[in-house]
Amino acid sequence: MELRGRGKIAAVSELDRTVAANLHRIRKCIARAAEVADRRPEEVTLVAVSKMQPVEAIRAAYAAGVRHFGENRVQECAAKRPHLADLAITWHLVGPLQSNKVRRSMGLFDRIDSVHSLELAQKISTIAEEGRRIPILLEVRMDTAPTKAGLEPDEVPDIAGAVLEMPHLDLRGLMCVPPYFAEADQARVSFHHLREIRDAMARRFEMLFPALSMGMSHDFEVAIEEGATEVRLGTAVFGARPPG
Ligand SMILES: *Cc1c(COP(=O)(O)O)cnc(C)c1O
């Protein structure tokens, strides 16, 4: 029993070192990309996407200063959270939310980053407790593949208008997942487009919509150059995801 305990501690600290080293590299990259765009690195929040990662990996990233974590499945987050209750984590849902899981998700996530339909927004607003306003992002489809989720770019302003009327939602901004390109720079046009949509919304509604969640492990530097305020990094932080 005691031996196993010691073995576990040793294994965890190796994970701690790996994740800390990854984060050190990532923060340098964030700083460099911010500088290119004449922005401050503090304007960019790192959201560590911990899907398929064990709670020890989340603790390792937390120990290295990460406070925002993203999960893409309600069930998985529900399983992990009880083991992480002592940490002051802000949880983001970054994956598709089925309407029958909305109620469950309310107690688990601090923000729903992947609101991909008006119906889902309505459902969240209806289920949210009286007096509560749930922070959300609208997910915009920047990938023409029909399987990909998200609002069509040209319907975003009207849906944003409808969401602003919903009493229990707090629309903070937009999120997107562009197609995977071998050359990260090819995603630039999508990131630029998302920012333009956000800026047009800001003018139309005379509100800020500060959050632009865009950029993943292979393209976050380009996203930062195009104005990302949040980058969602999984493999860059934790290494390859264990096979699920
Ligand atoms: C998995 C995931 C990420 C992180 O992907 P990496 O390529 O591992 O950085 C970011 N955003 C969403 C929506 C994801 O599902």
Image (cartoon, rainbow, N blue to C red):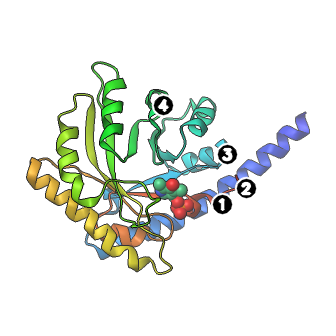
Residue 207 screen position, x and y as percent: 13, 47
Which of label 1 and label 4 is nearer to you? 4
Q: Nearer the viewer, residue 207 or 43?
A: 207
Of pointers 2 and 3, the one earlier in the residue sequence: 2
Is residue 23 among what the camera can see? no
Local SS, label 3? loop
Residue at numbered disc 2 = 14
Pointer 4: residues within 10 angstroms few (<14), some, or many (20+)? few
- Cβ atoms under marks 2 and 3 closer than 8 Å: no
Q: Amino acid at mark 4?
A: Asn
Local SS, label 4? helix
**Residue 54 marker:** 3
Residue at numbered disc 4 = 100
- Cβ atoms under marks 2 and 1 closer than 8 Å: yes
Of pointers 1 and 4, the one earlier in the residue sequence: 1
Which of label 2 and label 4 is nearer to you? 4
Cα gap from disc 1 to disc 4, whole angstroms: 38 Å
**Residue 18 marker:** 1
